[in-house]
Amino acid sequence: MATRLLWFFTVPYLIRAIDRRSAQRARRVGARWRIVMAWSGMRGAVSLAVALALPFTTDSGAFPKRDLIVFLTFAVIFFTLVVQGLSLPTLIHRLGVSDGGADADEELRARLRATKAAIEQIDALADEEWTRDETVERMRALYDYRKRRLAARAGKLEDDGYEERSLAYQQMVQLVLGAQREELLRMRAEGELSNEMMNRILRELDLEESRLET
């Protein structure tokens, strides 16, 4: 743990002195982030597996201090997982470290751009002979509503209850999917449906549920 702290507060400065490229400067993080990364150096299964792999005996007799090695390894694992692991959220909160919502903003921007591209493609397909008007209108309405909802979430449009209606729709879909799962389980229990067929349909229902927007 001391070595990790020492590393994060010495080597980065050495790299800064050697590598002056703009790409390297863009990857720099502040001291608070480096404290978090240093405190996140938790140890686990590999260390314990190596310790337990030590033989009980050797050609010269019992393996020296094997029990002590296993105990110390377990103690280090326990400390890092329990003490460091449980205290990490508090440390992050105390240091005020956050990504500033950058990931959420990036995801929202990508979803909005993708939705606009979908609407443009739907409009282009509307002139094709093989597309049906009712299908085009249904898909356009679906993606237009999604665009308004994302725009409202991004603050580009006044929220006219889009989020509330979307959550209500998701809840309704989940209840409907749940009813289907219960019926499939009942049919399987009564011998009306094979286990293989039930699992195949359940996977389709799970996939449909995973497609719900969050």
Image (cartoon, helix red, strand yellow):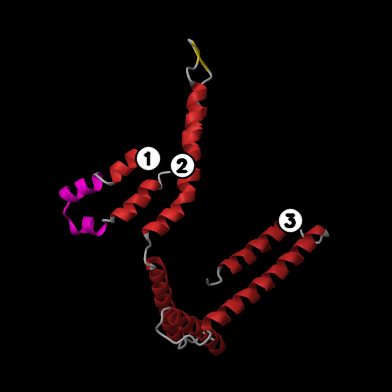
Q: Amino acid at mark 3?
A: Asn
**Where is 22 relative to 2, above or below?**
below
The residues tagged by marks 2 and 1 sit, at their Cα atoms, a distance apart of: 9 Å
Q: Are marks 2 and 3 in contact (CB under 8 Å)?
A: no
Q: Are marks 3 and 1 in contact (CB under 8 Å)?
A: no
Upstream in the sequence, badge 3 or badge 1? 1
Q: Is residue 23 on the magenta stretch?
A: yes
Q: Amino acid at mark 1?
A: Met
**Residue at horizontal 73%, vertical 56%?**
195
Which residue is identified by label 1?
A: 1
192 or 29, nearer to the observer: 29
* Residue 20: quarter of image: bottom left
The residues tagged by marks 2 and 3 sit, at their Cα atoms, a distance apart of: 44 Å
Determine the secondary structure under disc 3: helix
Q: Which residues are magenta?
A: 11-27
On screen, residue 73 versus residue 26, left or right, reads right
Q: Position of residue 190 (x, y in %)?
A: 83, 60
On screen, residue 16 versus residue 44, left or right, reads left
Check residue 80 in the rendering and tell me which mark sits there, or answer none: 2
Main secondary structure along the magenta-highlighted residues: helix
Q: Position of residue 182 (x, y in %)?
A: 74, 65
Determine the secondary structure under disc 1: loop
Determine the secondary structure under disc 2: helix
Q: Position of residue 24 (x, y in %)?
A: 22, 55
Q: Is residue 196 on the magenta stretch?
A: no
Visible in this render: residue 167?
Answer: yes
Which residue is identified by label 3?
A: 195
Q: Are marks 2 and 1 in contact (CB under 8 Å)?
A: yes
Instruction: Name the residue furthest right.
Output: 190
